[in-house]
Image (cartoon, grey):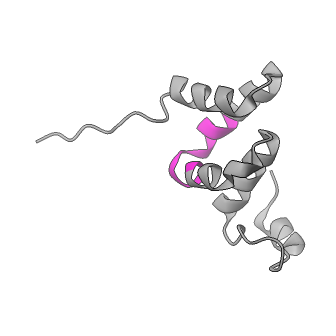
Amino acid sequence: MQSVKDILKKFNPMSDKYVSREFQSFGVHLSKKLVDERRKSLYIKLSKSIPRPILEEALRYVIDANARNRAALFMWKLKDLGAFKRKSIDK
């Protein structure tokens, strides 16, 4: 994983429209690794709301699997890891 310092060195405000924070950089990284750059905003949102270790574990699973549809397998693995469970509200 790149440090924030390295990311800012490579930052070009004319072409890098999505990257101003670290979680955005990770979301763009996810979209490139999953070969699904059309849905960058989804991965940016996921990287903001889901803990990083869960995202990294799902990404490692997908890369090791050599799947044709990496994005679908990634979303399935996130669901399998319990990333989308709702928090119960106790009254």
- Which quadrant, please, contains the C terminus? top left
Taking the magenta stretch, the answer to whether it contains residue 72 is no
* In the image, residue 24 above or below residue 66: below
Taking the magenta stretch, the answer to whether it contains residue 49 is yes
Q: In front: 57, or 75?
A: 75
Residue at coordinates 83% horizontally, 73% vertically from top-left? 15
For this orientation, the residue located farthest to the bottom is 14
Percent of width and height locating residue 7? 82, 66
Percent of width and height locating residue 26? 71, 54
Q: Quadrant of residue 9?
A: bottom right
* In the image, residue 49 above or below residue 67: below
Percent of width and height locating residue 89? 21, 41
Q: Is residue 75 left or right of residue 68?
A: left
Q: Is residue 11 left or right of residue 50?
A: right
For this orientation, the residue located farthest to the front is 38
Q: Quadrant of residue 53?
A: top right
Percent of width and height locating residue 12? 85, 76
Q: In front: 65, or 2?
A: 65
For this orientation, the residue located farthest to the right is 10
Residue at coordinates 57% horizontally, 31% vertically from top-left? 78
Q: Which residues are magenta?
A: 46-57
Residue at coordinates 70% horizontally, 67% vertically from top-left? 18
Total numbered labels: 0
Q: Quadrant of residue 67?
A: top right
Report the magenta stretch's main SS. Answer: helix
Q: Is residue 45 left or right of residue 64?
A: left
* In the image, residue 63 above or below residue 10: above
